[in-house]
Image (cartoon, coloured by chain):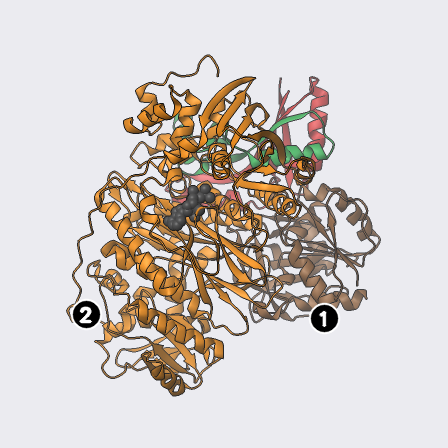
Chain colours: A orange, B brown, C green, D red
Amino acid sequence: MTAAAPAITPDVVKAHGLSAEEYARVLEIMGREPNITELGIFSVMWSEHCSYKSSRKWLRRLPTTAPWVICGPGENAGVIDIGDGLACVFKMESHNHPSFIEPYQGAATGVGGILRDVFTMGARPIANLNALHFGAPDHPKTRHLVGGVVAGIGGYGNCVGVPTVAGSCDFDPGYNGNILVNAMTVGIARADRIFYAAASGIGNPVVYAGSKTGRDGIHGATMASAEFDDTAEARRPTVQVGDPFTEKLLIEACLELMAEDAIIAIQDMGAAGLTSSSFEMAGKGGVGVEIDLDRVPVREDGMTPYEIMLSESQERMLMVLKPGREDIARRIFEKWELDFAVIGRLTDTGRMVLKARGAVAADLPIAPLSEAAPVYDRPTTPTPRPAVLDAAAVPAPASVMGALETLLSSPDFCSRRWIWDQYDHMVMTDTVERPGGDAAVVRIHGTGRGLAVTTDCNPHYCGAHPKTGGAQAVAESWRNLTAVGARPLAITDNMNFGNPERPEIMGQFADCIEGIREACLALDFPVVSGNVSFYNETNGKGILPTPTIGAIGLIDDLSRRTSVPFKAAGEDIVLIGATMGHLGCSAYLRELHGRRDGAPPPVDLAAERANGDFVRGEIVSGAVTACHDLSDGGLLVAAAEMAMASGLGATLTPPPGAPALHAFAFGEDQGRYLVTTADGPALVSRAEKAGIPATVLGRTGGAELTLKGAGTISVVQLKAAFEGWLPAYMGDGVA
Amino acid sequence: MKSAVIVFPGSNCDRDMQVALARITGTPPVMVWHRETDLPRVDLIAVPGGFSYGDYLRSGAMAAHSPAMTEVRKRAAAGVAVLGVCNGFQILTEAGLLPGVLMRNASLRFICRDVYLRVEDSRAPFTTRYRTGQVIRIPIAHADGNFFADAETLKRIEGEGQVAFRYCDPNGEVTAAANPNGSLGNIAGIRNRAGNVLGMMPHPERLADQLLSGIDGRAMFEGLSEALG
Amino acid sequence: MRARVHVTLKRGVLDPQGKAIGNALKSLGFSGVGDVRQGKYIELEIDETDATRARARVGEMCEKLLANTVIEDYQIDLDQ
Amino acid sequence: MRARVHVTLKRGVLDPQGKAIGNALKSLGFSGVGDVRQGKYIELEIDETDATRARARVGEMCEKLLANTVIEDYQIDLDQ
Ligand SMILES: Nc1ncnc2c1ncn2[C@@H]1O[C@H](COP(=O)(O)OP(=O)(O)O)[C@@H](O)[C@H]1O
Ligand SMILES: [Mg+2]
């Protein structure tokens, strides 16, 4: 340590985000006062971000196993078996706070981080997704944030050459002070070549590769765990700059090295950089580690051990190699023009010993630090139960078709083309279904099979009734996969919430988890990875609870799938699932009446499963030509989307016994699909045999969308409304 | 037909080009790392898309100086066919193999979407399988595709029939609305004077597979295969 | 009057472009090249004759648009 | 010594970035902004003490890499 090392005063402890009790535990573990480097290490390791101290108790409730799960939560990403000796590796992660402070770099480095989680495990990334929640469109910051975040996601993903194929985006004043940027990466690896983080082999070399370490983002992990207030601006320098070019080289170099028999353990340096990566590797392997900080490649002179250990410089990897394999590794990294250094070795001491300039800069016990990490059983208060809205009590619009046009030109329902136009969604030439459908479909390279991918969450439902909202998010993602003909396999979740120290927030969290759990169990849809982002709160006001679900499904034969557009005129349109006309928490209520009240639609998981299994069967058998699931916006919005995607109209007639016209058109009952088929009555009779509600609603054809009793509107006019809002809102020129 | 694909640090359409060439011409291309100075004897050299060197400084600028490009220049001078797609086009202009430059898109945004192109002629070796005036649909994916040349150069390019493709609407009309990036004369692709070097911003290799919603790019590789044996 | 604005990355912020340029110069055979940093240079005409006011206005433009003050610094020079 | 290089678009070459900045400034409410041009600013350290030789070397870097002389001009300043 340098002579100027700061004394460990209570203020210094507090500035490191450690409570008095937590610090007492530090003293106990150390048996002495820690120095500043050691304190910094405790601080990041025990931050909410790294320790999951508020969420761990609840996350344990999630179902994480299935015969096809190769690796559930606990590693860098989840791994599932997709047959033919291949595995799909995927995870989602938030970069909310950095993206609010610096939208371009915050979002870009979010993409970079999640890509590393996936290729660290030996997978080649094949698709990126993102789930975005912005503040109200008329909030002064929103336009700038949308422009920057989208450009940042594109800027990074496009450069590394991984297609960004799907995502979600919505706007609500609840996110004015805390936008959400959740990024997901999907990769493919050989099922027998998955790489894990657990270090082993006393004496084995510990190797650093990638970019040099600079003073960026020091304390990013604690920033991500601290609530915002108006001094957030002062924390600005903690934002990092991404270097997607280096990431691309790192992907290629790591995959090349992984093909050699050289790596024992590998871990990317994400939040809390060298600290968390080295602790994780040593901790999981039950070994000690000694690192010579003088050997760490640094970008600037005079970096202290504290800075080196806490730096969040991007595009870095830590590995434990088999003895004698250093030269092969070095050759590969040098070919790719990346830094490479042997910085330490594994020991049998169970301790982490850091050396700098010949002296010991830090000496900490590994297991006690991880095992004694605080776990909180925070108090929870349940969300008050919303009253169920009687559809009859919700006013009808002046014109149902006018209301449809209003909905389609609203911020939450308009086309997202402006966004995905900025993402290279075709590179790798395996994108079979591009953005814009229920789920994107990416071919498994060199085969006739494909993965379907989607992200979903309706925060309005979650806010009104967190348990229903959590279940609905899972069910909707399952439905979106089903709608393209995929067999849903597993999910990753990204839990975005406010301050967990507030019982109402913790109540939302616990209930959302419960809903997710029930849906996962009912749908055989385990959680294999995830991420928790708390403290999405400004001046005491939390965001809507937002448990984003990222889901993966498998299509065994790409010639047997469906998509949203109507395929031909004169086909029957069949509605699958029961329609009650549920308008609580609906888009109709929000966009046309400015109301956000009522209970969300109930989620009947048994019906969800039965309906979905039936629809998938019909798709795979070839009976279905187009399919779209019904979600927010309801039936008429879904029909309009099918029409707009094809340029072909349709005529629909509400069946006998249908609810009031506006409730029939815009009700958000779950578990429903619209499908087209050559022979509607035959499909309906098969459904009846299976006990599935189904009705022929009408026929495709013409250039207008007609709902009997409500009127007619041209598809061209709908499309103009649909495509217009976002480009007009974003304007031209510099974002 | 034998072909080679040059790979730079940051190339990311190299595999796509490899797959298209292998599948359509029947012979897998040789993948050549940018540091190599010994190019295999081939009939076609493809310079693929991507972000060579991150597109830092200027798109294509750093790759244009790589050892492999020195060889490509020699081969081009000797008449070997050279195809540059997207970043490859940018590299060929930076390397002086094609005139003009590709500046930042007028919208300043990255754009990924299908566009329509009017094929300006059906000369060998690149466009023999297209008809002059044919309208094809091919995707673009770039931030720097805004073709620019000074007035004199542009006159020469136009005068000598070096324009290979122009952005157009689905009916083949070359309009401002159909110009995605601000390119002069809606130019999407050009040849050198001799006709053996072609650069284009759109990606023919991306729509050359029945499963990917279009195969208008396929004819380029079939044509090359036919013209170059 | 004409304002000339330099926008540069703050010290300590990673400059991927500068780094790549430095490497490229090296591989082109230029030896002895140390740190390379890349920034933006913006020239603009403004209809303002008073230097103090001009500086204030351009400063506001920098804060609002031209520079990303989270990671960048800016410097304004005025030509009469 | 440190070299400071300005790379700017030649007169007559359309500058989409400059134009977009001009438009954005207008839409932000800045009036009276005339022509806006954007260029690059590159700082590099070189181990050279003689100004003439330094200028020659940096000039060569500009010709070879830093500028595309089809559309760009460059200007070199040296700090001791
Ligand atoms: N909400 C969640 N549900 C399930 N697993 C989770 C959740 N949050 C985190 N995990 C798991 O906990 C582990 C640690 O997460 P994290 O620290 O975000 O990973 P990383 O260090 O790779 O960024 C991961 O395996 C992750 O999948
Ligand atoms: Mg859907």
Q: With respect to residue A501, does A546 lie above or below?
A: below
Q: At numbered mark 1, what does the secondary structure look like: helix, strand or loop?
A: loop
Residue A166 percent coordinates (x, y) = 46, 58
Mark 2 → mark 1, Cα distance in angstroms: 61 Å
Disc 2 marks a residue whose amino acid type is: Ala
Residue A391 circle label: 2
Image quadrant of residue A490? bottom left
Q: Residues within 10 Å of mark 1 (few under 14, many from 20)?
A: some
Residue A696 percent coordinates (x, y) = 34, 83
Q: With respect to residue A699, does D30 lie above or below?
A: above
Residue designated by label 1: B129
Disc 1 marks a residue whose amino acid type is: Arg
Q: At numbered mark 2, what does the secondary structure look like: helix, strand or loop?
A: helix
The structure residue drawn at horizontal position 71% and vertical position 62%, both measured from the top left corner, is: B21
Q: With respect to residue B178, does A19 lie above or below?
A: above
Residue B77 percent coordinates (x, y) = 82, 51
Q: With respect to residue A277, does A733 lie above or below?
A: below
Mark 2 lies within 8 Å of ligand 2 (Cβ measured): no
Q: Nearer the viewer, residue A326 or A721?
A: A326
Q: Residues within 10 Å of mark 2 (few under 14, many from 20)?
A: some
For residue A346, side relative to residue A670 (left or right): right
Q: Chain of mark 2?
A: A
Residue A510 percent coordinates (x, y) = 27, 50
Q: Chain of mark 1?
A: B
The structure residue drawn at horizontal position 69% and vertical position 72%, both measured from the top left corner, is: B131
Res A189 seen here: yes
